[in-house]
Amino acid sequence: MSIEIKMPALSPTMEEGTLAKWLVKEGDTVKSGDLLAEIETDKATMEFEAVDEGVIGKITVPEGTDNVKVGTVIAVMAGEGEDVSAAAAPAPTPAPASTPLPPGEGQGAPAPRGEGEREKTATPTPAPSPVAADAAPPSPGGRGEERIKASPLARRLAAEKGVDLASLSGSGPNGRIVKADLEGAKPGTAPAAQPAATTPTPSAPAPAAAPAEHKPVWWDESIPHEEEKLSNIRKTIARRLTESKQTIPHIYLTLDIRLDALLKLRGELNKALEPRGVKLSVNDLLIKALGVALIQTPKCNVTYTGDKLVKYSRADVSVAVSTPTGLITPIIRDAANVSVSSISTQMKDLAGRAKEGKLQPQEYQGGTASLSNMGMFGIKQFEAVINPPQGMIMAIGAGEKRPYVIDDSLQIATIMSATGSFDHRAIDGADGAQLMKTFKELVEAPMGMIA
């Protein structure tokens, strides 16, 4: 039987994506693990792997197509022993008397839809609630077969061998059972087939909220210009920053920090780490300082959810990285407890792959607070926008020589300004001030954060 390849959800927040590039063509033979396409999600451009074996019979969504909904059939693959031309052939139109398919099922790539599309695609006459044609009967113990993640080929082979899919552990994406998982599986353990009976009507899903319409913006077309289509990443940045500024009451706290002790320690550590090929940056040490400060000031390591306050016992610091397609924030997990050499190594790897668009979702989604450093651009001070659902972000300015009072005398020191942006719904000003004070103390006496 032919296998439908559908638009995958490559991140928890992904609802649609751009099919940037096909890496296979019709007639190509693929096996599990082969790369099929490059897909631009709301965060990055990621590679999509095959989970089944077969021959690409037909590509239904051409590369470069925008706004492809998750679950849309983007290609059809012929299974083992199946004629490729048969797999590529369009499915026959069902007779009017047959049970209608749910809107969007088996229709290939749907046209862009808006509010009310469900009414447009529904059948004109009342009919019983539709049931998916390939819904599997429930297995013993009340566990429905439809709840077991398995490829169509794996399901067919399991049925032929008499293997209960519930007894297997999947090695595919998100624990999906693929053909390789059936090798060595003992036959005869599949539950007895249930006789055809009235299938319970599935509850209708809640209609998705219609996306807000963009109001037209006037601009002077008489000025020489060019227009650039927004990428999914840029759209996500615009949406999330707008959401942050509209829904989170920001409070900003700024202080000056003396860097001389940290710069001295950095030089000593780099000399010691040189044989290992590790070179610390000032930013690596600031990530460590923020992680330790968050643990020492737990009231700032929180998320406001509307009806409760989530208090984190670990500090995962998201670090802003500029890429050709926009800003992304890879995460240093447990920044307070990992070594600065590990932070440095991780950041070089994460930043490099971020600029290539090769980060995995778990590497940039989450985090308990963020750090954004624009000092390398000579920016003296700025106020960063909180990255929801986090409760704060630290903005780092440039270190520069300034007059500074040391031991009651005016001297020249290397000073940087740091500004904390706090979610005032969850973090009081006094608590934010305590975190800023702790951060300053750690930077000015850095041995305390690495001891």
Image: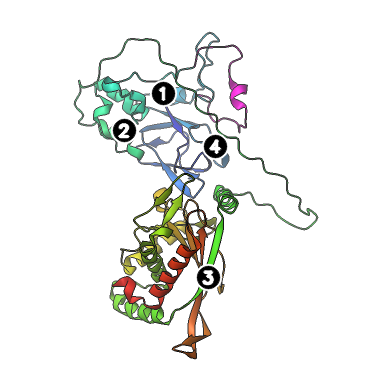
**Residue situated in front as seen by the camera: 328 or 385:** 385
- Residue 193 forms part of the magenta stretch: no
Q: Quadrant of the N terminus?
A: top left
Q: Which of marks 3 and 4 is in front?
A: 3
Report the Cα–Cα distance between label 2 and label 3: 53 Å
Report the Cα–Cα distance between label 1 and label 2: 24 Å
Q: Nearer the viewer, mark 1 or mark 2?
A: 2
Report the Cα–Cα distance between label 3 and label 4: 44 Å
Q: Is mark 2 on a helix, strand or loop?
A: loop
Q: In this view, does 343 lie to the left or right of 421?
A: left
Sooner in the amino-acid sequence: mark 1 or mark 3 = 1
- Residue located beneath label 4 in the image: 68
- Amino acid at dot 1: Asp
Structural crowding at the residue carrying mark 2, measured as other residues with C-alpha within 10 Å and reported as few (<14), some (14–19) or many (≥20) = many
Structural crowding at the residue carrying mark 4, measured as other residues with C-alpha within 10 Å and reported as few (<14), some (14–19) or many (≥20) = many
- Amino acid at dot 3: Thr
Q: Nearer the viewer, mark 1 or mark 3?
A: 3
Q: In this view, does 43 lie to the left or right of 217?
A: left
- Compared to 285, does 349 lie above or below? above
- As drawn, the label of residue 254 is 3
Q: Furthest residue to the top?
A: 97
